[in-house]
Amino acid sequence: MSEQHEGRGVALVTGAANGIGAGATRYLAASGMRVVVCDVDDGPGRELADAVDGLYVHCDVREPDHHAAAVSAALDRFGRLDLVHLNAGVTSGCTLGEDFDLERYRRAMGINLDGVVFGVHAALPALRAGGGGQIIVTASMAGVVAVPFDPIYAANKHALVGLVRSLGVTLGPETGIRVNALCPSFAETAIITEIRPLLDEWKFPVLSVDDVVDAFARIVTGTETGECFTVVPGRDSEPFRFRNAPGPRPVS
Ligand SMILES: NC(=O)c1ccc[n+]([C@@H]2O[C@H](COP(=O)([O-])OP(=O)(O)OC[C@H]3O[C@@H](n4cnc5c(N)ncnc54)[C@H](O)[C@@H]3O)[C@@H](O)[C@H]2O)c1
C-alpha cells in the first residue's frame, strides 16, 4: 500500500547498511525524508530501515534489475523519489601484475562503476516524473589523485568523477535534476581496515563518518551541479577546481 509522502521527500541510498551510507541515511531521515535503505548486508540494513521508519530493499548494485526494483519500491511505498545517493563501494584488494585477480577486478568495477551507472539509469525516470531532484554519488579523493596501492579503485573512482561532471551538463537546469560527487579522503569505516596500520604509521588524519555526512548535507542543501566536493580533514568541503584542459590551438 502506498503512503503518499507529504513531508520533505523520499530518498534512496545504496550501500546504506554501514559506514557513510548509514550516516547519510540517518541524516536524511532526521531531515524529514523517508528513506529506501538498499544494501546486500540484510541484517544491519533492515535494522537501520526499522530505526528510521524507512524501507529495506536487498539491492546488489551490480544488478540493473535490483535498481529497478528499489526505485519501484520507493514509488509503491512512498509515492515519489527525490534524492538518490549512489554510495555502495569496495576496494579491489589487488593491484596489477602478479597479484592481479580477474574476479576481484570485475567485482570492484561492477560495484563501484556499474553500480552507479545502473543506479542513475534506474532513477532518472522517477526523478523526471517528480519534476526534478538530485543524485549524489560517493566517489572519493581517489577519483582525483593517484592511489598506488589500489589503482583499480582509483580507476573506477576517476570514472565516477567523469560521469558526474558530464551528467551535470547532460542534465541541464531544465531537468531540475542536480548531480554531484562526494569525494572523501580516508574515513573511519570498515573499508579502511586493511590500510589502517599504514595510516597509523603515516599518522594520516582520518575523517569521522560525521565529517563526511556534514559534507553530504552541504551538497543536499546546496545549489551546485556537476561538482566533485572534496572532504579532507581540517578543510571545508568545496567543489574541486579542475584545471582547464588545453583546447585546439587556433588555426591562423
Ligand atoms: N571510508 C573511506 O575511507 C572512504 C573514502 C572515500 C570514499 N569512500 C567510499 O564511500 C562509500 C561507502 O563506503 P564506506 O566507507 O561507508 O564503507 P563500508 O564498507 O562501511 O560501506 C560499504 C557498504 O556497501 C555495501 N555493499 C558492498 N557491496 C555491495 C553491493 N554489491 N551492492 C550493494 N551494497 C553493497 C556494504 O554492504 C556496505 O554496507 C564507498 O563507495 C567507498 O568507496 C570511502
Image (cartoon, grey):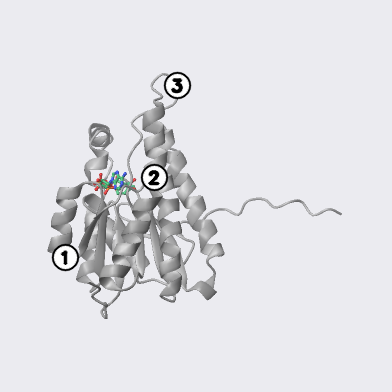
Extreme residue in the bottom direction: 6
Q: Which mark is residue 112?
A: 2
Give the spatial CA distance, label 3 vs label 1.
45 Å
Q: Residue at x 25, y 79 (%)?
A: 7
x, y percentage for residue 124? 45, 64
Q: Tell whether 143 sits left or right of 60.
A: right
Query: Which quarter of the figure is the N terminus placed in?
Result: bottom left
The nearer-to-camera label among 3 and 2 is: 2
Write the residue at 38% across / 52% down. Answer: 65
Badge 2: how crowded within 10 Å, few (<14), some, or many (20+)? many
Q: Ligand 1: does it lie within 8 Å of the C-beta at label 1?
A: no
Foreground: disc 3 or disc 1: 1
Residue type, mark 2 in image: Asn
Q: Label 3 vs label 2: CA separation?
A: 21 Å
Q: Is residue 103 above or below residue 170?
A: above
Q: Which mark is drawn over residue 130?
A: none
Give left or right: position of 164 versus 108.
right
Q: Is residue 200 above or below residue 187?
A: above
Q: Position of residue 230 (x, y in %)?
A: 39, 55
Task: Identify the residue under disc 1.
Answer: 52
Q: Earlier in the sequence, mark 3 or mark 2?
A: 3
Kind of residue indicated by mark 3: Gly
Element under disc 2: helix
Mark 2 residue's CB less than 8 Å from ligand 1: yes
User: How many labels, in total?
Assistant: 3
Q: Position of residue 190 (x, y in %)?
A: 22, 42
Q: Nearer the viewer, residue 173 or 34?
A: 34
Q: Secondary structure at mark 3?
A: loop
Which quadrant holds residue 73? bottom left
Residue kind at label 1, given as amino acid type: Val
- Say whether marks 3 and 1 touch (CB < 8 Å): no
